[in-house]
Amino acid sequence: MTRVFSGVKPTGHLTLGNYLGAMRRWAAVDQHQADALFCVVDLHALTVDHDPARVRRLSRQAATLLLATGLDPQLCTVFVQSHVDEHARLSYLLECVATDGEMRRMIQYKEKAARERERGGSVLSLLTYPVLMAADILAYGTDEVPVGDDQAQHVELARDVAVRFNQRYGHTFVVPRATPPKVAARVMNLQEPLSKMGKSDDTGPGIVYLLDEPDVVRKKVMRAMTDSGRDVVYDRTARPGLANLLEILAACTGGNPEALSGVYESYGALKKDTAEAVVEVLRPVQERHKELCVDPGYVEGVLRDGAQKARAMARPTVDAAYGAIGLLPAAADISVTV
């Protein structure tokens, strides 16, 4: 069976974009059709200035929301990255194979490093975190990584590092491939429709969070930025704000954005229907989240069992990598001849 790995980073509250672009498919498709692992990648949240208490809080919230969206621990593995030591163990080995030039060419590093310099400088892990991401993937013999366009470069790095390691030290890793989502790959910011609706951006009005109250969702959608003109047409280049609303509505209702554009004669009617569609899509997720919050022991048990299962899957591959690259096994009887 195909093995799939995906993760969510607890750097902000999860958004409608996270759900429509990835999480909904994980629950509806991937956990049923693959040997799937879903991880809260909390180590990645340490690459920028952060509040430790907030990272812990968001990590728990992200894990709870993964379950609330429909992931079933009987069908897939749900765990927290830092609970499985093999991620960090393998990351260093891959740093010994990846190059400085590869790290500095990563688009997200350039963007994030520029922001961090304004705050006093970036930490080294911001440069090397794509290697940790490669370790996340390669430790499990992952075949497919469902990602959007903005993360495809990271999967390409994982492929390059896996091939290089295999060529130098013998076949150790499965070479993964990126599998972009078929629909709603990118949900754009409601106030800045040329920018992705990102959870790390806390500007608020343009971002619909999974736990936003229905009235808050309605207000944000009704205030969404549209474009000049009065006719409702689907044109991502000339009318990005309108196209974003149509795509969100289509993703929520199973429709086609171009076909939906012919249904509406005003922006107001489109916004109203889009708002209600989003509210209805989020309703079961929010209701399940409330149920899980009442029973935190259940979530902790899922994460504990998930980490144990993930550890058992990753350890043989990571141990093999340690041996292949030239490290002595910890239990070896080492004798020294003078």
Image (cartoon, rainbow, N blue to C red):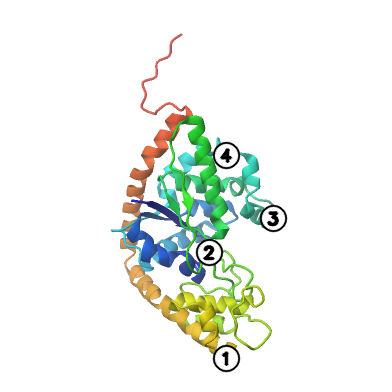
Residue 72, position as x, y percentages in the image: 32, 62
Q: Amino acid at mark 3?
A: Ala
Badge count = 4
What mark, if any, has residue 114 been given in the picture?
3
Q: Which residue is mark 2?
A: 12
Dot 2 alpha-carbon crowd within 10 angstroms: few under 14, some 14 to 19, many 20 or more: some
| Residue 42 relative to residue 229: left or right | left
Give me the C-alpha separation between circle 3 and circle 4: 22 Å
Regarding residue 212, the answer to whether it shows in the image is no
Q: Amino acid at mark 4?
A: Ala
Q: Earlier in the sequence, mark 1 or mark 2?
A: 2
Q: Earlier in the sequence, mark 3 or mark 2?
A: 2
Task: Name the residue furthest top.
Answer: 338
Which residue is located at x 55 percent, y 36 percent?
97
Task: Name the residue furthest left.
Answer: 74
Residue 92 vertical position relative to residue 289 in the rendered view, above or below: above
Q: Which tag is nearer the camera, tag 1 or tag 4?
A: 1
Q: Label 2 near label 1: C-beta < 8 Å? A: no
Q: Which tag is nearer the camera, tag 3 or tag 4?
A: 4
Q: Amino acid at mark 1?
A: Glu
Regarding residue 133, the answer to whether it shows in the image is yes
What mark, if any, has residue 265 been given in the picture?
1
Dot 4 alpha-carbon crowd within 10 angstroms: few under 14, some 14 to 19, many 20 or more: many
Give me the C-alpha separation between circle 3 and circle 2: 19 Å
Q: Which residue is mark 4?
A: 98
Q: Earlier in the sequence, mark 3 or mark 1?
A: 3
Q: Which tag is nearer the camera, tag 1 or tag 2?
A: 1
Dot 3 alpha-carbon crowd within 10 angstroms: few under 14, some 14 to 19, many 20 or more: few
Which residue is located at x 34 percent, y 58 percent?
33
Q: Earlier in the sequence, mark 2 or mark 4?
A: 2
Q: Label 2 near label 3: C-beta < 8 Å? A: no
